[in-house]
Image (cartoon, rainbow, N blue to C red):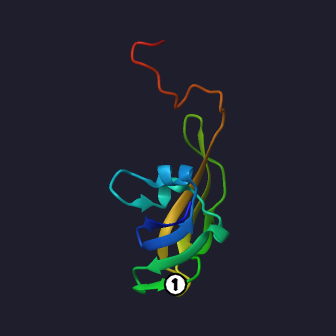
Amino acid sequence: MSDTKLYGSGGYIIADITEEQAKKADLGVGKLFLAPIGKLEEQKMKKHYCKVCEEEFNSPPKVHLEEKNREEVADNLVLVERGQYNCQKCNSIIGEYRVFEKKDDSGEIGNAKPSGSP
């Protein structure tokens, strides 16, 4: 896929993303968002724009790992990593990411069932 603009609360990142990532990032409002994608690889990020600096930079943002511990957030869903994309110049937050993992992929949690099914 080509370079795509992904919005965060403090600006945006231009990154090379896959079709699957683009589908996750599309919340149906005509823009693509960072948060649903999870963590982007640094080499895939090309540029970033900071709302605080009001400037676009020809480099990826800094990736700041906020937490890396396993926290159960729902049945069969564990938060593995939490982090931020920060401006290279002023360090303000461009966007945040979360990495989740299912404890048991064969489990029933999160699988849609028709109403009336056991």
Q: Residue at x 59, y 71 (%)?
A: 45
Q: Residue at x 65, y 64 (%)?
A: 41
Relative to 116, residue 109 above or below: below
- Residue projecting furthest to the front: 2
Relative to 59, residue 34 above or below: above
Type of amino acid under label 1: Phe
- Front in this rendered view, residue 85 or 4: 4
- Classify mark 1: helix, strand or loop: strand
Q: Residue at x 63, y 67 (%)?
A: 44
| Percent of width and height locating residue 79 | 59, 49
| Tag count | 1
* Residue under label 1: 57
- Front in this rendered view, residue 72 or 90: 90
At label 1, counting other C-alpha atoms closer than 10 Å, the crowd grade (few under 14, some 14-19, many 20 or more) is some
- Front in this rendered view, residue 109 or 58: 58
Q: Quadrant of residue 2?
A: bottom right
Left or right of residue 94: residue 102: right
Q: Quadrant of residue 84?
A: bottom right
Screen quadrant of the N terminus: bottom right
| Percent of width and height locating residue 23 | 48, 49
| Percent of width and height locating residue 15 | 55, 68
Left or right of residue 67: residue 53: left
| Percent of width and height locating residue 19 | 54, 52
Relative to 19, residue 51 above or below: below
Q: Residue at x 48, y 58 (%)?
A: 35
- Residue projecting furthest to the left: 29
Relative to 40, residue 23 above or below: above
